[in-house]
Amino acid sequence: MPGIAYLGPEGTFTEAALRALAAIGMIPSADSGAEALTPVATDSTPAALEAVRAGAVQFACVPIENSIDGPVLPTLDSLAEGDPLQIYAELTLDVSFTIAVRPGLAAADVRTVAAFPVAAAQVKKWLSANLPNTELVPSNSNAAAAQDVAAGRADAAVSTALATERYGLDTLASGIVDEPNARTRFVLVGCPGPPPPRTGADRTSVVLRLDNKPGALVGAMNELAIRDIDLTGIESRPTRTELGTYKFYLDFIGHIDDDSVAEAMRALYRRCADVRYLGSWPTGDVVGALPPSFDDAAAWLQRLREGKP
Amino acid sequence: MPGIAYLGPEGTFTEAALRALAAIGMIPSADSGAEALTPVATDSTPAALEAVRAGAVQFACVPIENSIDGPVLPTLDSLAEGDPLQIYAELTLDVSFTIAVRPGLAAADVRTVAAFPVAAAQVKKWLSANLPNTELVPSNSNAAAAQDVAAGRADAAVSTALATERYGLDTLASGIVDEPNARTRFVLVGCPGPPPPRTGADRTSVVLRLDNKPGALVGAMNELAIRDIDLTGIESRPTRTELGTYKFYLDFIGHIDDDSVAEAMRALYRRCADVRYLGSWPTGDVVGALPPSFDDAAAWLQRLREGKP
Amino acid sequence: MPGIAYLGPEGTFTEAALRALAAIGMIPSADSGAEALTPVATDSTPAALEAVRAGAVQFACVPIENSIDGPVLPTLDSLAEGDPLQIYAELTLDVSFTIAVRPGLAAADVRTVAAFPVAAAQVKKWLSANLPNTELVPSNSNAAAAQDVAAGRADAAVSTALATERYGLDTLASGIVDEPNARTRFVLVGCPGPPPPRTGADRTSVVLRLDNKPGALVGAMNELAIRDIDLTGIESRPTRTELGTYKFYLDFIGHIDDDSVAEAMRALYRRCADVRYLGSWPTGDVVGALPPSFDDAAAWLQRLREGKP
Amino acid sequence: MPGIAYLGPEGTFTEAALRALAAIGMIPSADSGAEALTPVATDSTPAALEAVRAGAVQFACVPIENSIDGPVLPTLDSLAEGDPLQIYAELTLDVSFTIAVRPGLAAADVRTVAAFPVAAAQVKKWLSANLPNTELVPSNSNAAAAQDVAAGRADAAVSTALATERYGLDTLASGIVDEPNARTRFVLVGCPGPPPPRTGADRTSVVLRLDNKPGALVGAMNELAIRDIDLTGIESRPTRTELGTYKFYLDFIGHIDDDSVAEAMRALYRRCADVRYLGSWPTGDVVGALPPSFDDAAAWLQRLREGKP
């Protein structure tokens, strides 16, 4: 049970995210003397989340958003259905590849390059400029590409720093990606529990299910807007149960312990057919407008109640 | 200072309202052994309210709404400007007149009828049917009409039951009014203090001053509507200070100690250039939809905070 | 039928408004060679409007708003019920009184002052400063006060310039009123017809009847706000037919031939249980923000339809 | 120029969609005697759209939404930036695979299975149940997997019906997919032009760019909601130019020639920093609530203008 599931195999970006989260102390432990959580590779993101639900691991580290492809909907859909789960932390990694080679091999001697096809598409320009006249050999994952080099099935691999090191390969180039600024955001997911304390730079995420009537979504979003809560993401998804009905993923700035966020959450609860809380957690940087303080208004109301306007 | 101001002279509907409020215990006293408040007649409604502000009396009883003519704007305007005042109780009286005659005089012998012109207009049909061929003699108030009869200046008066009794006249007819169901609502006004306790059948009233931009009023009213608070009255009034700017009188069902009303009030405070609280007080009957309870939503939020969704 | 009804008797402010409207050509005539409309006094504002409905007169001139007492609800209520009527013009008069005396009488010799009680209240300060030690004699109207002087029942009258002249009295003082800037707005009402042409400085007025559900009023007002139409007045009035239901009087800037106003009107029609159109008419001065032009948006849409974005 | 670009290589699902669109006459031609459009394979979806912009082809057929992964954001992002493009038609295909084998080979003799890794993940359960004890060989695309079998690099392929036929392979099984009901929606994209005529079952799509202020998105969505227009999809995407600013993809039911849709479009134009119209096109089936007719309201307004309420 003191494990942490991630999309394997070993050496993927997700494992790198997991290690980065641990390094900066974002992976909570029951007590300070807790033993380290053992990474457990799974073969899909939903499988990682199911392992949390089943109690096989304490946490899962999964990608939730990508700057090129947008929200990772299989992750969101898996969070939205089944037993409740909760997000406790997030980490954003620049997406860039390491070009790994068999030890000692020079670039000029590379004839074949192993790559996961999705990764190959992201470094196509670099390869044609830097490793022209090479043949592309498909691999099953970024980590498998490095393994393919180690096993002699290719000269070079489009892979990760982690896999390069693990399979004892040399680094020909690092930080490689055609489209600059590509980033993936990963989240740490566990069973429901008290959210981490408010830091002032937090994100809250919910899944709304709404009655199928005109204006229902606008009404729900209005509950955030009138309280000046900064929506940072919205995605609609059809529900599978009824034609023409939708669920909505909403991200906004603030913590459930901000008065304005708490008031908005209560309003969503009253208004929506269902609200699933996905957590409040620190983001490190503030990514938009902070939720307003309601302290002045509360003090004014208190004065009215005491007859001292 | 233990007085209560009202629109005089003695014998008006306002004095009747004041006595009715006292009779049903709606006029609060500082302590249970308090001496009775002495009625003090003033010559206008604003003057009655000024007497409260000046500390000359403890309360004023003033008309605030009439089923024929609508809100009594001089009352509302006087509440909205100057030092804050607060409403503590209300009472609605059917508006109907007593036809008073000199003792012993029969209807057939009435030749002249004294009446305040506004009242004369409200009993015109009754007079032409029941006292035809009489001459109308204008009086300065409903009470003055009875006094005119007592002084021999007229045979009959369109007046109140209170004045009829006070001037020792006979009652020729009572409950007289052409338009049935005419009613006037009176309120008891004092200096700001803790509002009377929530009874479950309460009214709250505010004056809003809004920035002069499109949608400002809709935005403010929306703060009530999204919380399902039942607006029972709205009146716009130009402000005198700036062209095209308005203040708004809003009445709604509920008490400042209802969670939903409290939340709406805090929202109005944040949104409006100024909110003047005119009080929360019992209405006896519920006059619309009760403000919703927010208890379930608050309990749900508490469970989220404890990690037990 | 070529008459115009007004609240009599002769010499009232309403007759003055009627004459001012005629003087500036605001009273439309079927053709330019039309004979002048004969003023017809009625004994109430609703009676003046009923005379239009009955075909007894072509128009009525009635007060609709007063800067001290607010909207004249008997006028609005009469417009809102029964057969439709329509407003064609408006005129705002400063409310101030003429102090009329018997010819040749000096101020020092005035002992009694006849006054309609409502008018007496509005010149109370002036009288105590300028005609102290005089006795107030109630009259049935502002015009009747002058008549009372002519008939020898009083030395002076709080009256109008029109009545002073009509009854052959001298003017002791004019432009008298305690509260400066008191004004009354009068409107010219006829049977429904094409509204007067758009001038760019127009007002439109409607009566809304709404289903009794939360947010219905906000929803209707939102149809104006989202189109940046400047609401210049709103009054709620209980309907008499059903407890807790209301009708709303709304005034806004613009003409039914403004695109934005037309679009808002169609939206109100779709949304409300009933919309009664009270007319679009020129105001002379612009009294707020003009309705926006929708021309650019319409041209853009046309380009899309033609495939030329 | 009479070409139609698609995501290659030959034999992909996108080519299948393109052929299906042509088969049902959804690919418009300048005149009925037009020659058929030549399919032109590109190596990415954005490249297909760029070929349209460059005038190299007349249309592109690209995936826009997937029932598992949601909107295809590279397609949407490419539509939202650069010179305007327009959608003219759509087609939804069930996503399922054909298992192709070397002619004559029995299932029991299959030792290696070529598959694009993304496809392999979607048929994992089927393979372990039906082709256990086989080794997975990665391919560069679904079509390439069939080619790998034809070239002798694998015994079987997870591929498409089109590629199976093209490379002369046998079909071991068809309609294979682990997750039932997976579907992809494809659209036909060209340069801007008059949209196809309204059919009554249409979809309209826009990209909004909003000023970065609270409530801007709610305000824009409200323009659809108050007109009872059925929003069928919304996705937020950060803009790259400014931190904390977003663009929004909105899909809704109706055609730019529906009065209600036209009115909403004009309102969005007035309200948003930028509106990019992506087209109105037939969907075949109605996928939600139809846009309301505004005919009654327009007729009512016309009657008011004519003075005949």
Image (tube, coloured by chain):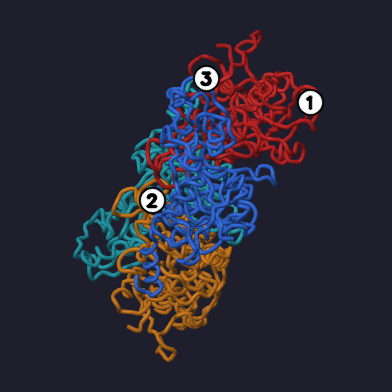
Chain colours: A cyan, B red, C blue, D orange
Asked if the residues shown at circle 1 and circle 2 are in contact, with their CB atoms under 8 angstroms apart, the answer is no
Q: Which residue is mark 1?
A: B105
* Front residue of this view, candidates C49 and C224: C49
User: Of the residues shown, which amino acid type is indicated by label 2?
Assistant: Val
Q: Are marks 3 and 2 on the same chain?
A: no
Q: Residue at x 52, y 14 (%)?
A: B56
Q: Residue at x 26, y 53 (%)?
A: A175
Q: Is residue D38 visible?
A: yes
Residue D8 at what x, y percent from top left? 38, 74
Q: From the viewer's perspective, is the residue at label 1 or at label 2 nearer?
A: 1
Q: Under tag 1, what secondary structure?
A: loop
Q: Is residue A3 visible?
A: no
Q: Which residue is mark 3?
A: B191
Few, some or many C-alpha atoms within 10 Å of disc 3 (few <14, some 14-19, many ≥20)?
Answer: many
Residue C3 at what x, y percent from top left? 56, 57
On residue C286, the disc is 2
Position above or below: D46 against C51: below
Chain letter belonging to callout 2: C
Q: From the viewer's perspective, is the residue at label 1 or at label 3 nearer?
A: 1
Q: Report the side of B14 relative to D33 (left or right).
A: right
Residue B299 at what x, y percent from top left? 59, 33
* Front residue of this view, candidates B25 and D30: B25
Asked if the residues shown at circle 1 and circle 3 are in contact, with their CB atoms under 8 angstroms apart, the answer is no
Few, some or many C-alpha atoms within 10 Å of disc 1 (few <14, some 14-19, many ≥20)?
Answer: some
Mark nearer the N terminus (1 vs 3): 1
